[in-house]
Image (spheres, rainbow, N blue to C red):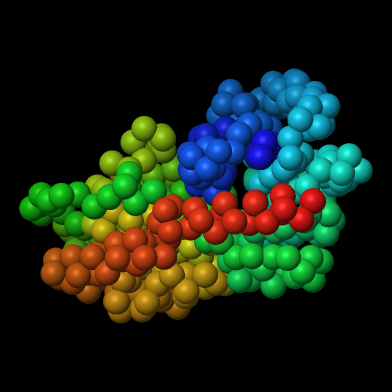
């Protein structure tokens, strides 16, 4: 098969890097040709979630829109159009409808509750042009749909009968525990994420402060971007800019990983990938008891699920105080990843979904 992958981001974007790009070698190994077409290029992506630069963003957007139109022109060369999240960030399902009119087979993949209104603070001026209702149309137009979790699958099944769940996987050969953790006085509690998920950190402000008072040797670090509005936490948490080159080393520097969420419909669409990242490098996870977190984390085995600030403090305290407990939970988490969330475990299903869509043409 010749497969055109329509994705939103360059490789800097976590979503399509883990849900699409890491499967490409497996597809090629099975004789398929793959062509990747992100909407945003690296230059635009680096300023996308930053305040201002509206003229520059508009100019970039026009150029990249023309590139997306070119994808329609060349789509006749391909057997399958694989769409991750959406073809175009604004308006309705114009491109998806066009692909269907041209009788192309479509596989659609989504890993967030994109059918709900959600837009970053830095790009609120675009909210008028966003159309989350188009996700229903994209799902309906597709020959096969891949949902990141059961909550998303349940939504998609209202518009398409052919919906499979495929969790976001990780390369367990690249994301590995440290061979030997150096003995150190400090215990590092880490968070890694994007602008969109950093909004959950302020809810733990009192937790950060109380833990720092209770355990002076404990330190919190957040790795990501868009921390401008969180500077009020600088007395209890350190901020570090995320980079693709340092991502694995940053994860390995943590002794405990945290994943706070707010219990709402958007959070239920999350695919617990932070927890999977932490587990892949052999560290225990403390996470909100929300959505897919409850499927990935076995409470008290490979991490802890918590409901309130009291439980956050209690579970973090247990892990800070007990090195052996951190090691045991980290090992259990690593085993979870190897058995359920490694790329090699999920690649066969990913390949099968695409080949099934092609065979039904």
Q: Nearer the viewer, residue 85 or 352?
A: 352
Residue 361 appears in view: yes
Q: Please give the name of the residue rendered at 78% of the width and 47% of the height, measured from the top-left corner.
A: 105
Q: Position of residue 325 (x, y in %)?
A: 18, 71
User: Image height check: is 291 above or below 67?
Assistant: below
Name the quadrant containing residue 247.
top left
Q: Please give the name of the residue rendered at 91% of the width and 43% of the height, measured from the top-left corner.
A: 101
User: Image height check: is 296 above or below 5?
Assistant: below
Q: Please give the name of the residue rendered at 66% of the width and 25% of the height, measured from the top-left corner.
A: 53
- Location of the N terminus (image quadrant): top right
Residue 204 appears in view: no
In this rendering, would 333 be left or right of 150?
Answer: left
Q: Nearer the viewer, residue 32 or 339?
A: 32
Q: Position of residue 350 (x, y in %)?
A: 56, 54
Q: Nearer the viewer, residue 304 or 160?
A: 160
Name the quadrant containing residue 217.
bottom left
Q: Position of residue 242 (x, y in %)?
A: 41, 38
In this rendering, would 189 be left or right of 232?
Answer: left
User: Image height check: is 225 above or below 73?
Assistant: below
């Amino acid at each position: 098969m010749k497969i055109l992958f329509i994705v939103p981001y360059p490789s800097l974007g976590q979503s399509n890097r883990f849900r699409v790009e890491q499967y490409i070698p497996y597809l090629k190994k099975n004789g398929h040709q793959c062509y990747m077409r992100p909407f945003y290029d690296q230059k635009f992506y680096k300023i996308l979630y930053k305040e201002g630069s509206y003229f520059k963003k508009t100019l970039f957007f026009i150029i990249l829109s023309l590139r997306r139109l070119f994808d329609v022109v060349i789509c006749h060369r391909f057997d399958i159009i694989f769409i991750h999240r959406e073809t175009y960030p604004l308006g309705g399902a114009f491109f998806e409808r066009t692909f269907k009119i041209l009788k192309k087979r479509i596989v659609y993949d989504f890993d967030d509750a994109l059918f709900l209104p959600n837009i970053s603070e830095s790009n609120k001026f675009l909210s008028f042009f966003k159309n989350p209702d188009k996700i229903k149309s994209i799902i309906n137009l597709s020959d096969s749909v891949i949902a990141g979790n059961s909550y998303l699958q349940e939504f998609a099944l209202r518009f398409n009968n052919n919906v499979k769940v495929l969790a976001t996987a990780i390369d367990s050969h690249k994301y590995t525990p440290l061979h030997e953790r150096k003995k150190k006085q400090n215990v590092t509690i880490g968070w890694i994420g994007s602008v969109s998920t950093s909004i959950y950190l302020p809810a733990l402000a009192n937790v950060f402060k109380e833990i720092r008072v209770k355990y002076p040797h404990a330190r919190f670090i957040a790795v990501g971007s868009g921390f401008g509005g969180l500077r009020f936490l600088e007395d209890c948490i350190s901020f570090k800019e995320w980079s693709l080159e340092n991502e694995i080393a940053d994860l390995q520097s943590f002794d405990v990983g945290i994943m706070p969420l707010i219990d709402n419909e958007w959070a239920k669409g999350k695919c617990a990938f932070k927890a999977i990242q932490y587990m892949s490098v052999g560290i225990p996870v403390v996470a909100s008891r929300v959505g897919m977190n409850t499927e990935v984390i076995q409470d008290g085995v490979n991490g802890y699920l918590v409901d309130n600030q009291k439980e956050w403090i209690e579970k973090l305290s247990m892990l800070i105080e007990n090195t052996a407990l951190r090691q045991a939970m980290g090992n259990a988490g690593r085993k979870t990843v190897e058995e359920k969330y490694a790329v090699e475990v999920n690649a066969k299903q990913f390949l099968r979904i695409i080949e099934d869509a092609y065979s039904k043409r």
